[in-house]
């Protein structure tokens, strides 16, 4: 309902000014890995130099002097470039590295070039699409530099065949002689495997001249899947391999032998079978698949420069658990490294997040043998990077890597500084921001935590809601805690009557966010028929006066008060009796119809309505791109964002009023902003060196520490920021 009051409020926004940026120090909240890294590459030009590519968090370089991984794209403002399709360390000059970046088809793609190990990049837009976060992102490497003349690079694209550059990636042209020109534009939400890897045989040329012999794999389902060129990648011929399998990965030994991993699909899921083959320089192949490998496919292949007969391969999607096989005789016999491996995950205990011990790994599409030490082997998984130096003892090699997607976070008024909700990893109670947390979100375990809430007057009482990435929760998607999130008990809603006369439990798909009253005694759950419980979810009563799909929040200071954004009636409602009955607020008016302000990401959306932890009756409403405040329990709403186009917002400790934090755009600048005067002035608090692809999911200030802000990114984990000069 549009009212004259609402229209007047929109017509007369608070004037806002962008003040001078406030310098902040940004630090990752430590998890230690956490997400899928499709590949790891060790430089052949310098010992202890390695690169890691991720599917949504950019690339990293191992800095041996600092003993940590260094993120290479934190200054990047293009979201798509955080999905890295391929990396090619220069085989001669350790300072040069080239990278193919692009999240998916239809998004910007580019070749990134660096002459200082990724500290700075020059960006070359290209006409071929990437798929750094699509199916098949573990294929490769698609980008390869000629070890004899590194200024020549070849790139195998997903949709448009093979491409070549002879000026270190500055310009590109399609290789017309390659037999697989590409399948062209894919269907919506689909992709192609395309040219899966490209490799030059260094023994086929001399320094300064183009290598004569090149190999390329294809992961498109029809046609041939392995190709050989003997004239410097100009003309190509097909080479026979296993029938019906895709050539997904390749590695060349020091004597020119090519090893190829084959799989029935492009991964990282859905691979049912595979094989390993060895090829001589003449193109003749021999099957060398480990005899007792079980089901699943083979993905990464790695060779040892110091030992031409040493080769390692990784399995993928094997039902008994994935592993790495090692051979010291060119594949004639194999050793299962995972069978007796000892894993020390004490530095990253979160790896037991599903209630089990950390396993050897899944989605093992990255594997590397150190060119300078064949006993140093590393591989990537869907959750971490493991490394060994004795082939028996493995530990996460993740210091500095924060590759996670964070759904939500809350900084409470007491207890730990931060509680988070993650995708794939459930979430954590962060007692120490500098240490990887222990898994706490069990009973029930939910891979994704979509909503967190705590009782403002009893902050040890928490509720959470979530979902599983492999299907609906089996028993419950809701839980309650009385010890600050360290232990939980499941909450289950009763079956709710449906329009067809049947009943159904609606709380099994993660779409019923919970809220807990300020005193922690009441829980309200938003379902098609919202429900309230006063005994920790053992008994439930229907909530009156609020429509299906409404967003319900509890006042943080007034025990029996709840509020609801009722999208069906375009009203802000209030309950003064513990959530049992909601009524319109006398004199209240919203700044326009709520339909356009509905969450756009479903169950993972951040709340549009937030109750302040500092004062009873103080509310903040995110409507469209504006932010509004009520200090009287919803009766009046005053705009507090001015010209800032707000995407996400949070509250933190202030002086007279809460400090406002927001992700949004002011003028032409999109970033992270802070206001200490209820939106009259906004200061940017991130800078051009801290942009993280501008991929943000949530933001919150700290209610106990002035100036502290927490930012949840989509791919680079959680950051906390503090003013470098103190609170200003």
Image (cartoon, rainbow, N blue to C red):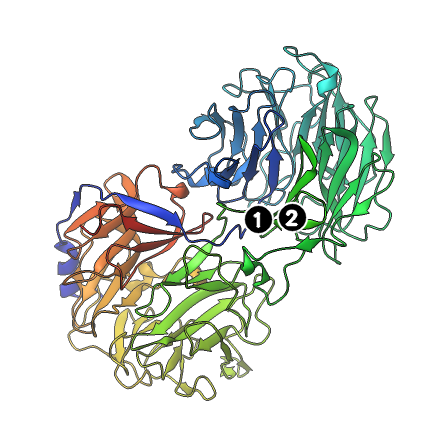
Q: Residue 324: where, in percent of width, then height?
A: 73, 46
Element carrying mark 1: loop
Residue under the point 26% across and 78% down:
574
- Residue 17 location, quadrant: top left
Mark sitting on residue 530: none
Q: Is residue 133 visible?
A: yes
Residue lying at 21% horizontally and 58% vertically, measured from the top left: 659
- Asked whether 618 or 349 is in front, the reply is 349
Q: Please state if 403 lies on the left or on the right of 616 as rendered.
A: right
- Count of numbered badges drawn on the protein: 2
Mark 2 vs mark 1, CA separation in Å = 10 Å
**Can residue 511 be seen here?**
no
The one of 540 and 479 positioned closer to us in this rendering: 479
Residue 699 figure quarter: bottom left
Across and down, in percent, residue 523 comes to 39, 80
- Which callout, 2 or 1, points at the residue further toward the start of the chain? 1
Pointer 1 local density, CA inside 10 Å: few below 14, some 14–19, many at least 20: many
Give the answer, above or below, for where 46 lies relative to 363. Answer: above
Q: Residues within 10 Å of mark 2 (few under 14, many from 20)?
A: many
Front disc: 2 or 1: 1
SS class of the residue under badge 2?
loop
Task: Tell me, yes or no, whether the two marked residues, 2 and 1, touch with CB atoms within 8 Å.
Answer: yes
Q: Residue tagged by mark 1?
A: 36
**Residue at 12%, 55% in the rendered image:** 12
Is 467 positioned to the left or the right of 587 in the image? Answer: right
- Residue 225 is left or right of residue 578, and the answer is right
Name the residue at 35% across, 81% down: 520
Q: Along the horizontal axis of the image, is 584 left or right of 520?
A: left
Residue under label 2: 268
């Amino acid at each position: 309902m549009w009212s004259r009051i609402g229209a007047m409020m929109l017509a007369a926004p608070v004037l806002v000014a962008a003040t001078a940026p406030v310098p902040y120090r940004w630090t990752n909240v430590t998890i230690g890995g956490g997400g899928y890294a499709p590949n790891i590459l060790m430089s052949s030009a310098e010992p202890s130099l390695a690169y890691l590519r991720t599917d949504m968090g950019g690339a990293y370089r191992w800095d041996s002097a600092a003993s940590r991984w260094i993120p290479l794209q934190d200054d990047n403002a293009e979201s798509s470039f955080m999905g890295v399709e391929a990396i090619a360390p220069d085989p001669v000059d350790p300072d040069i590295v080239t990278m193919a970046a692009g999240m998916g088809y239809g998004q910007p793609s580019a070749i990134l070039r660096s002459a200082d190990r990724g500290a700075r990049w020059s960006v070359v837009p290209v006409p071929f699409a990437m798929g750094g976060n699509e199916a098949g992102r573990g294929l490769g490497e698609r980008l390869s530099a000629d070890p004899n003349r590194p200024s020549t690079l070849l790139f195998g694209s997903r949709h448009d065949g093979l491409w070549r550059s002879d000026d270190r990636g500055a310009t590109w042209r399609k290789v017309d002689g390659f037999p697989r020109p590409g399948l062209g534009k894919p269907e919506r939400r689909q992709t192609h495997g395309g040219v899966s890897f490209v490799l030059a045989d260094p023994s086929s040329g001399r320094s300064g001249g183009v290598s004569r012999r090149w190999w390329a794999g294809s992961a498109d389902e029809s046609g041939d899947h392995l190709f050989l060129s003997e004239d410097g990648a100009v003309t190509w011929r097909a080479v026979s391999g296993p029938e019906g399998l895709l050539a997904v990965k390749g590695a060349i030994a020091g004597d020119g032998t090519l090893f190829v991993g084959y799989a029935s699909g492009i991964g990282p899921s859905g691979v049912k079978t595979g094989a390993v083959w060895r090829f001589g320089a003449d193109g003749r192949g021999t099957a060398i698949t480990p005899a007792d490998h079980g089901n699943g496919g083979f993905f990464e292949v790695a060779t040892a420069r110091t030992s031409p007969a040493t080769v390692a391969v990784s399995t993928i999607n094997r039902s008994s658990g994935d592993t790495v096989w090692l051979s010291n005789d060119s594949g004639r016999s194999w050793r299962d490294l995972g069978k007796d491996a000892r894993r020390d995950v004490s530095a990253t205990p979160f790896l037991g997040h599903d209630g089990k011990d950390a396993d050897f790994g899944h989605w093992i599409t990255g594997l590397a043998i150190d060119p300078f030490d064949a006993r140093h082997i590393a591989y990537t998984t869907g959750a971490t990077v493991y490394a060994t130096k004795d082939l028996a003892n493995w530990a996460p090699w993740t210091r500095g890597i924060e590759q996670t997607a964070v759904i939500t976070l809350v900084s409470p008024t007491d207890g730990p500084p931060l509680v988070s909700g993650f995708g794939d990893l459930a979430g954590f109670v962060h007692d120490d921001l500098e240490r990887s947390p222990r898994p706490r979100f069990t009973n029930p375990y939910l891979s994704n935590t979509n909503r967190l809430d705590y009782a403002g007057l009893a902050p040890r009482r928490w509720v959470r809601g979530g979902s599983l990435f492999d299907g609906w929760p089996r028993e419950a998607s809701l839980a309650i805690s009385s010890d600050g999130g360290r232990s939980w008990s499941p909450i289950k809603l009763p079956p709710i009557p449906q329009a067809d006369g049947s009943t159904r439990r609606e709380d099994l798909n993660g779409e019923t966010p919970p809220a807990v009253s300020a005193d922690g005694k009441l829980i309200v759950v938003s379902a098609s028929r919202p429900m309230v419980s006063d005994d920790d979810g053992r008994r439930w009563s229907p909530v009156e006066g609020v429509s299906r799909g409404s967003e319900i929040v509890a006042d943080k200071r007034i025990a029996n008060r709840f509020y609801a954004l009722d999208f069906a009636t375009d009203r802000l409602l209030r309950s003064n009796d513990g959530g049992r009955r909601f009524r319109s607020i006398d004199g209240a008016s919203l700044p326009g119809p709520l339909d356009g302000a509905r969450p756009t990401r479903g169950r993972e959306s951040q709340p549009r309505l937030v109750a302040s932890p500092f004062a009873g009756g103080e509310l903040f409403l995110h409507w469209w791109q504006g932010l509004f405040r009520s200090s009287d329990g919803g009766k009046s709403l005053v705009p507090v964002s001015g010209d800032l186009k707000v995407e996400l917002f949070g509250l933190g400790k202030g002086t007279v009023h809460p400090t406002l934090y927001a992700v949004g755009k002011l003028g032409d600048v999109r970033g992270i902003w802070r206001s200490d005067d209820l939106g009259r002035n906004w200061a940017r608090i991130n800078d051009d060196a801290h942009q993280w692809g501008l991929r943000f999911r949530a933001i919150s200030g700290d209610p106990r520490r002035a100036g502290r802000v927490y930012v949840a990114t989509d791919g680079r984990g959680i950051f906390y920021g503090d003013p470098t000069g103190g609170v200003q």
